[in-house]
Image (tube, rainbow, N blue to C red):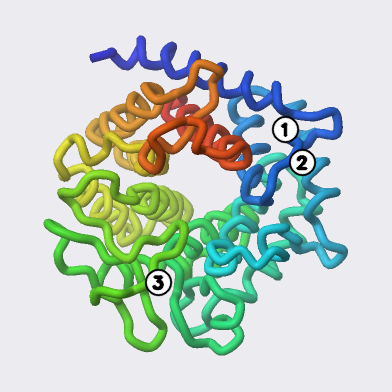
């Protein structure tokens, strides 16, 4: 097993390979060619910035501004115009990442103008975020845990602390507090009328499964990672222990699973969440989990530097270009977060 010092160098080389692939596909206008969705590049400017390519990040932001920003300041994703079912179920998800990525690049004209539009999808009762526009309009339906986690990050980084806190409170006081079988399963779906959905037949969305089984392989631990990350950040912002306690609860659920359960590209955001919890607690187990996940991600990195979702495919050719841009950007960013802590 690599020591932390050797891992730092190992991770940096993997990050550089990923960046080289991304930059090689960046066009003169700052864009990335024939990407089919706004989601494809929602994290790319943040990844380029934090991984050491600020000029390329600025060019990407400039292209996004022209390609996706509406006159009223919100976003016009082609996947929504095309009525893509997975995107319609999580409408605020990509905009939340766009806000986060733009704000880290100081593109305040993009980030700050977009937040009020994003917050129209926040449920006034629970504080969580609806995924579907029609359910938000009616005030009744699924409060999407994945959307809530990422939107809380977007609200927090742009200074909407109260709105972000209410989202985090929904995650801690409802979703996490109402789960009772942490030794077996985590149910992330919350219905505004029925509460926590533990019955079979609950439809998952792209970033929110209906359940995560602790002992099973290829589980959607990207969601547990996002929860740990945002709750760690909320603790950093407020110093309230309930957020740290909730982050630990979710971390222990994932970290206490059989080792091979985290050897999946579906666990990628848990590297980010674990290292953010390490930042708050200094617990070396958090860093060890983050490194285990990163090691697995790098084992699957393609020779050209790109990343694909091996948990979902058998051949790299099955993973399309737009998704390759998205995943390579995300994995590079999580690797950078962990490298920074080593």
- Spatial CA span between label 1 and label 3: 33 Å
Circle 2 sits on which residue?
A: 61
Name the residue located 72 percent from the left edge and 54 percent from the top edge. 111
- Element at label 2: helix
Give above or below for 151 relative to 45.
below
153 vs 229, left or right, is: right
Q: Earlier in the sequence, mark 1 or mark 3?
A: 1
Identify the mark at residue 170; answer none if there is no mark. 3
Circle 1 sits on which residue?
A: 57
Circle 3 crowding by C-alpha within 10 Å: few under 14, some 14–19, many from 20: many
- Spatial CA span between label 2 and label 1: 6 Å
Q: Earlier in the sequence, mark 3 or mark 2?
A: 2
Give the foreground label among 1 and 3: 1
In which quadrant will I find the C terminus? top left
Give the image location of residue 331, x and y in percent: 49, 33
Give above or below for 118 relative to 230.
below
């Amino acid at each position: 097993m690599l020591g932390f010092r050797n891992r730092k160098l190992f991770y940096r080389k993997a990050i550089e390979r990923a960046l080289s692939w991304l930059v090689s596909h960046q066009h003169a206008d700052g864009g990335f060619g024939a990407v089919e969705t706004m989601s494809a590049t929602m994290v790319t400017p943040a990844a380029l910035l934090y991984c050491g390519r600020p000029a390329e990040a600025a060019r990407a932001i400039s292209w996004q501004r022209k390609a996706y920003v509406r006159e009223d300041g919100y976003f016009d994703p082609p996947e929504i115009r095309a009525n893509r079912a997975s995107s319609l179920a999580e409408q605020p998800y990509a905009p939340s990442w766009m806000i986060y990525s733009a704000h880290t690049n100081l593109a305040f004209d993009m980030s700050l103008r977009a937040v009020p539009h994003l917050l129209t999808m926040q449920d006034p009762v629970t504080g969580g975020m609806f995924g579907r526009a029609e359910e938000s309009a009616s005030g009744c339906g699924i409060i999407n845990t994945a959307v809530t986690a990422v939107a809380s990050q977007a609200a927090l980084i742009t200074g909407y602390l109260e709105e972000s806190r209410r989202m985090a409170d929904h995650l801690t006081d409802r979703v996490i507090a109402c789960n009772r079988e942490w030794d077996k399963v985590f149910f992330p779906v919350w219905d505004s009328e029925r509460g926590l959905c533990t019955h079979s037949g609950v439809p998952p969305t792209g970033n929110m499964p209906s359940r995560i089984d602790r002992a099973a392989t290829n589980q959607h631990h990207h969601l547990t990672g996002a929860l740990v990350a945002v709750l760690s950040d909320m603790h950093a912002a407020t110093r309230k222990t309930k957020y740290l306690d909730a982050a630990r609860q979710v971390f222990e659920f994932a970290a206490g699973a059989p080792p091979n359960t985290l050897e999946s590209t579906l666990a990628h955001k848990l590297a980010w969440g674990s290292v953010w919890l390490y930042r708050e607690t200094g617990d070396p187990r958090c860093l060890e989990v983050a490194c285990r996940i990163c090691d697995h991600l790098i084992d699957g990195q393609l020779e050209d530097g790109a990343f694909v979702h091996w948990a979902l495919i058998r051949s790299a050719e099955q993973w399309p270009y737009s998704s390759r841009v998205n995943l390579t950007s995300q994995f590079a960013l999580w690797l950078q977060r962990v490298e920074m802590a080593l």
